[in-house]
Image (cartoon, rainbow, N blue to C red):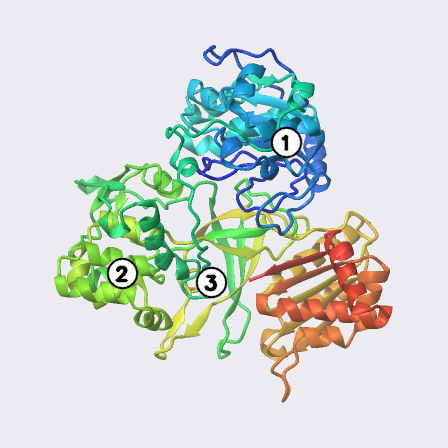
Amino acid sequence: MPHTDSEEPGVLNLTPLTLAGGAAALAAAGVFTYALTSRRPKSSDEKLGPPVPRGSQEDPKILAELQEARNTGMTPYDDSPYEITSGCEYVAVHKKEYVKAFDASLILGASKPESILVLNAPWLTVEELDEELPSKFKLMVAEKRLKLFVINASLVAKESGMGRLINNIMQAVFFRLSGVLPYEQALPLFEAAIEKTYKNKGADIVRKNILAVGYAIDNLHKIDVPFSRWMKCERLDHSKPRSGEEPAFVRDVRVLDIAKGDDRDEDGWATAFDQWLPVLCEEVGAKPEEEEEYEALFEVTCLPVTAIEKQLPYHRIVPPGSHAVPVRENRRMTPMEYERDIRHIVLDISAVDLPFRLGDAITLYPQNLREDVDKLFDEVLVHLDRNDVVSVKCLSEDVPARLHSAFTARMPTKQIFTELLDIFGKPSRSFYKQLARISCDEGESKQLNDIANDDVKFKKLLGKSVSYAEVLKMFPKSAKSMTLVNFLETVPLLKPRLYSIANSSFYSPGIVELTVVINRWTTSDGRLLTGTSTKYLGFSNDTKVCVSVASGTFVFPEDERTPMVMSALGTGIAPMRAFVQDRMYKRKVLGMDTGPMIVFYGCRHEKEEFLYRDEWKAFTEAGVLTKVINAFSHDQDHMIFVQHKMAENPELLYKYIQQLGGYFYFCGPSVAVPDVEAAVKNAVRTVGKMTEDEVELWFENDIKAKKRYSTEAY
């Protein structure tokens, strides 16, 4: 699928056809491919020719072939942090500077003999390549007898109106050369994907992207590599000395200690960033963040509103790619007096195009409660009028697409704080620094900087789960200095949340079902708080929610007779319910034979939290569900967890996972993953009479390598 992100400068962008490769900086391959073609070299100043003709409409048979290619034609990344593993059939260098900035072994070392190499560069003749390519690079091309193609993607982007964006151009080249699907079949699919991806940005953007695809293929050049001459090149690189005109990331190479954020920490990746950034700025000679010249990202205009306009209906902000769908049901499944509030939520998707597959998740866009926002304006933001209708202009490409889309229409200020800004979320250190910079009060500014720079003070506030709104309440003079532009620049967007879909689209069409626990916790100062998203779902009484579909990570057997062993904790039972429903439909409606299904289900109490118990009984009586094995952790004087129940049934695990080649699935908190994995390994080791080393080899080379072991942890 095409993606809308532009390439990041300074990142080595390689595209291996087999998806073999582990550096985080190496880009993944696309899913469409094109047949190999050769074209006459053109001079670098030659104007582009016409685009290739567009193909026909999508064909269901082609889509099926595409899905098969997606599932079977690629192998996963490895764990290597620096280079690609061996076996790549396609390498694309997206920036010409990389051939001199990086050793040839890093770029070409993993490529197979006679594989495809694509360069984005203006060097379209052998003579130009002789002059520009390092000696070692040419030698490796010759040694591996690589098929070399060159495209001046930057010129293609410029001539087709795409500016500097070459992402879809380089993807089009990949599709043209890799050969998984015939070109005439793949082209309409790619163009349809472009239309779907960019339709919200207007017909002109769609047209330019499709035009760029055609130009790309028409300006792709196959180079007749002089293998015998390049074989004589020296392995030591004697490339010409730097002229001083190279990009800074090539010219000024320095080494800094890596900064590792802690994703388990309250402050996430930012735990190390604020300490590392000043060191980076000093090393490269950049100004510290607080000394940078301020450039506004937004321009806000307050508009007069007529009496008629005040009566106009409210229009919800719908994020790009999502749909506002009705909430058909929002039912509490646990008793009212019970401490945990678990909901069964049903969304009506019958009127929108929102297809989903087994194992997919819903991306839900929460809002802040309107009463909470009103209280914020009443107590803190008294200098802003919540009812002001504003027009917001985005002044930078760095502004998120979601805001670009939202601000195509004017809206009340209150709506921005209700639907867009995460004003009740936890602030990072940088917010304290930014608020200190904006503040007109010297005393409060000093206190804010002290918090940002003092680890103890900052973490104390984190422990209290202090929100942006509460920080503003703590520093009222600084809050009064905040304009709407300041809020848009310093407070992040409300983050979308993912929820596993709890139903099969075949078993219950036209709806999406979710199993959601209202997330509540006690802070270090004894306050009981509720998470933004689940507070919205639990207490907003909103009749519609904005959602989109996110692809799941679960992999399913092709043969429905293959055993499925499932382990779930709490609301992690949601996808397992969908799996059983799916086989129920196939068995009872389609008349298919289905294999054994085992569910290990862990929760706190049987009476209060054994979710969907009547359904499990019905599935078992229908012969679809083989067995449900429960672990009610708090119903006895000692804790019993799901891994304990798995350990009590090693023969069952060994039979269905090892002997019959079944698939294993886990969904639940990430803290349980190691214990669940250990239970599976111990069952195979004890029943199968294998050594620990043999079990580890089986686990890595069999069940995981064959994608028979899927986990979805949170």
Decide if residue 72 is on the left or right side of residue 44.
right
Decide if residue 269 is on the left or right side of residue 399.
right
Q: Secondary structure at mark 1?
A: loop
Q: Nearer the viewer, residue 143 or 510?
A: 143
Q: Nearer the viewer, residue 679 or 545?
A: 679
Q: Secondary structure at mark 2?
A: helix
Above or below: residue 104 compared with residue 361: above
Give the amino acid type for the residue marked by disc 2 in the picture.
Answer: Tyr
* Nearer-N-terminus badge (1/2): 1
Classed neighbour count for the residue bearing mark 3: other residues with Cα under 10 Å, few (<14), some (14–19), many (≥20): few
Whole-percent x and y of residue 274? Answer: 35, 58
The quarter of the picture where the N terminus appears is top right
Can the viewer see residue 460 in this picture?
Answer: yes
Q: Quadrant of residue 401?
A: top left
Nearest to viewer (mark 2 / mark 3):
3
The residue under the point 66% across, 39% down is 110
Q: Which residue of the protein is positioned furthest toward the bottom in this rendering?
A: 637
Whole-percent x and y of residue 224? Answer: 65, 16
The residue under the point 76% across, 55% down is 701
Q: Check residue 32 in the rendering and tell me which mark sits there, or answer none.
A: 1
Residue indicated by mark 2: 432
The residue under the point 54% across, 57% down is 499
Q: Check residue 262 in the rendering and tell me which mark sits there, or answer none.
A: 3
